[in-house]
Amino acid sequence: MRLWERLLLRQKRGNRRVATVQASEEAEEREMAEEAKREFWRWTESNWRDPDLKWEEAQIITVGIDVGSVSSQAVVAADGHIYAYSNMRTGSDSP
């Protein structure tokens, strides 16, 4: 094989490697974008109430609320015991 043929072959191999690396990088970027979308709302909304606790009989009722740009949480305690809690999405683009 002549020198110019070997150089041409190397160049073709190099171009294939560059194309493969570019395709791999593009696939990775797409995957990261999809992951970012999934990750943004990956938690589910939830709420819970203790059916055995009678809040009406409590001496002290305490409420905690956290309102954020993406989600809001609230908890209700009766005499130091958790009576109920809730977690919900509250962002402007919430589904």
Image (tube, rainbow, N blue to C red):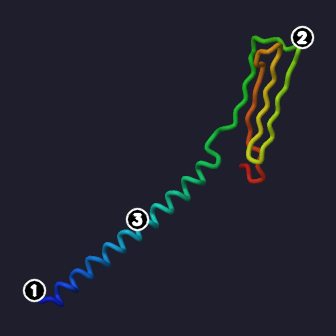
Who's the residue at 76% across and 27% down the image? Answer: 85
Identify the residue position indicated by label 2 in the image.
Answer: 59
Name the element at disc 2: loop
Of pointers 2 and 1, the one earlier in the residue sequence:
1
Who's the residue at 64% across and 49% down the image? Answer: 40
**As drawn, is 14 to the left or to the right of 65?**
left
Residue 81: x and y in percent read 77, 15
Identify the residue position indicated by label 3 in the image.
Answer: 24
Q: Determine the CA span between mark 2 and mark 1.
A: 94 Å
Q: Are the two marked residues, 2 and 1, in contact with CB atoms closer than 8 angstroms?
A: no
Tag of residue 1: 1
Q: Which amino acid does label 2 sit on?
A: Gln
Q: Determine the CA span between mark 3 and mark 1.
A: 32 Å
Of pointers 3 and 1, the one earlier in the residue sequence:
1
- Residue 54's place in the image compared with 70, above or below, is above
Residue 55: x and y in percent read 85, 14
Q: Which amino acid does label 1 sit on?
A: Met
Q: Which amino acid does label 3 sit on?
A: Ser
